Amino acid sequence: MIPFLDLKQQYQGIKDEVLEAVGRTFENTAFVLGPEVAAFEETFAKYAGAKYAVGHNSGTAALHMALLAMGVGEGDEVITIPHTFVATVAAIMYTNAKPVFVDVDPHSYTMDPSKIEAAITSKTKAIMPVHLYGQPADMDPIMEIANKHGLMVLEDAAQAHGAEYKGRRIGSIGTAAGFSFYPGKNLGAYGEGGATTTSDDGINERLRILRDWGQKKKYYHEVLGYNARLEGVQGAVLNIKMKYIEGWTERRRAIAKQYDEAFAGLKHVKAPKAYADRRHVYHLYVVLVEDRDGFMNFCKEHGVGTAIHYPFAIHTLGGYDHLGNVGDFPVSEHVAARCVSLPMFPELTDDQAKKVVEVVHEYEAHLGA
Ligand SMILES: *Cc1c(COP(=O)(O)O)cnc(C)c1O
């Protein structure tokens, strides 16, 4: 069986380094924040092309704290997309602001900039595009609209470590960007983790206070704060992984290239489109298939693991159905009903990728012309 995702192989490859660094952190008893986290923040800020990176205990916390640091709260509206992981939308709701959806582009499944202006009201405070699956959203028009209307931009970069838009790193374009280090993400901690990048001095300062109980100095709690700090061990693991992230990313891109070439022109399995002006980092390789259940079963029977990201547009889910009606965002709903993620991780071998291609081709042949 070719798994959809395998985290074991990568661990085996870096095990000695990881155990040494984790042991060192335990010896230092720097369990929360500390020198490993500070070093990681510096490295990751550079990597993302930003002045600062602030470590958090999840990607969700990074997005939540970033919105708070940008001053988003009760009575505000934040424009985002309904085809994403639920955390994007939940982070907005945690601040008591209202998520306002616009549909996605039918090719990249990221925010369709032509839909934004119609969604802007006097309450709109920020735009929150998602670099879904590892492909940057179309940031130039998004930034242009934001600047024209005096809005801030928070990038949900949870799936886009090292991605680039017109030569610029993701994490350096909007007002701030939130990254996730959930284990399965392109840069994964060994537990929960996240970070916000920004080049704004005020936002950086507010983030450091917000994540640490609202205190600038111990016990001087000046604002309502949170426990949202990155753990020392996660910093230690992430520091090691930063040495490999570029190689791993290039390997993802090479696998995607094999898939792209093999799937071009298929009738039943629609390959994803990567825009030439962006560096797609393929957190996920997602195809669209009309008979999703049939395709996934076929793959399983032929030894290929698959997954769905994500099966429901957010406005069609129980906790979020006040944010829209079925039919309001047809492209998101279309994609959510048909998307299938194929095996994609740096340790996937060429032979395994070939086998995935064979099975997809067999599925096509089995359905006929
Ligand atoms: C993973 C993810 C998040 C949340 O990150 P966590 O670290 O799991 O809290 C937010 N947005 C998107 C698009 C994600 O994929």
Image: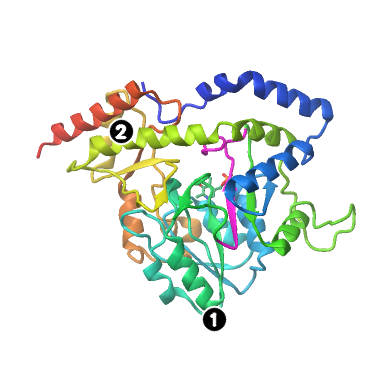
Residue numbers of the magenta segment: 174-189
Q: Residue furthest bottom?
A: 122
Magenta-colored stretch includes residue 10: no
Visible residue check, residue 175: yes
SS type, badge 1: loop
* Residue at the spot 85% in from the left edge and 59% down from the top edge: 221
Q: Nearer the viewer, residue 282 or 89?
A: 282
Magenta-colored stretch includes residue 179: yes
* Residue at the spot 74% in from the left edge and 60% down from the top edge: 206
Q: Is residue 169 left or right of residue 285?
A: right
Q: Which residue is mark 1?
A: 122
Q: Is residue 341 above or below residue 313?
A: above
Q: Is residue 174 left or right of residue 26?
A: left
Percent of width and height locating residue 17: 66, 22
SS type, badge 2: helix
Position of the N terminus by quadrant: top left
